[in-house]
Image (cartoon, rainbow, N blue to C red):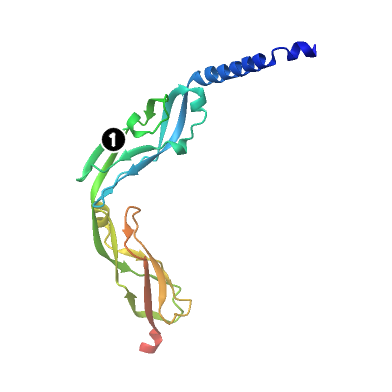
Amino acid sequence: MKRLFLRNWPLKLLSLCAAFLLWLIFSGAHELTTAITVPIQYRNIPKHLEISSEMVEEAHLVLRGPSARLSRLSGAEIPVIINLGDITTAGQRTFSIHRDNVELPPSVILERALPAQVRLSFEQRITRQAPVHVRFENVPAGQAVEGFVVEPPTLEIFGPRSSVMRIERVEADPVDLSVPQPERGYAVSAYAGDQRVIFTGPALVRVRVKLTSPAANK
C-alpha cells in the first residue's frame, strides 16, 4: 500500500498542484454582483467660492466582477471623487457619478450609483466684521450693570454671501456676574448662529463690567 502511494509521487504532486491552481482560477473567476457604501470626497474646492447647499457624504455602488476581487473590496478604499477644480463662478452645478469617479480594480464594473448625480450650489465667499452682543446673568442683588467694555467689539466672520449677510451680530455667551470679575475681565465665547459661517480667528472676547448699586444713586 505504501509503495503504491509513493509510486510516481512527483507526478502525483504535480497533478495535485495543478488541480489546486485550477480551483483557484475558476473560483475566483465566478462573477458576482454586490453593493457597498463608500464616502464621497469633494476635491479642489475653489478658494473664492463656498458650497452653500447640503453635501451628500455617501454613495451606494452596485458593482459586478470576480468574486475574489469583490470580497476584498472595502468602501473606505474606493471613495467617489468629485473634482470641483473647473468651477469658477457662483451658481448650481450637477455632477454625475460614473466609472471615472471611482478607482476600481481591473475587471470590476460599476453597474450603477445611488445617487447617480449630485447637485451643489456655490456662492461667493465674503468676509465682514460682526458686532458682538453681550448678555449678563446672575447680577448681584442690589446692584446693576452701569457699563461694560467688550474687547474686541467686533469679530471677523466669513462664509457664503447669503449666510454672512444675514448675520447682524454674533452672540456672546452670558457673562455670569456671580463670579468675581477677573483682572482682565470675563472671557466668553461668541456664537455665529449659522453652521456655514466661520470665525477667521478665535471666537473669544473679554468683557469688563462696572457694577453700581441703585441705592447709592438715590
Number of numbered discs overlaid on the protein picture: 1
Residue at left offset 29%, top offset 61%: 157
Q: Quadrant of the N terminus?
A: top right
Percent position (x, y) of residue 174? 41, 68
Question: In this view of the protein, which residue sits in the foreground, 136 or 108?
Answer: 108
Residue 91 relative to residue 65: left or right: left
Q: Is residue 98 visible?
A: no
Percent position (x, y) of residue 154? 29, 69
Percent position (x, y) of residue 172? 37, 67
Q: Is residue 47 visible?
A: yes
Residue at left offset 41%, top offset 73%: 187
Percent position (x, y) of residue 2? 79, 14
Question: In this view of the protein, which residue sits in the foreground, 96 or 188?
Answer: 96
Q: Amino acid at mark 1?
A: Phe
Asked if 195 appears above or below 30 in the picture, the reply is below
Q: Residue lying furthest left in this view?
A: 89
Residue that badge 1 annotates: 95
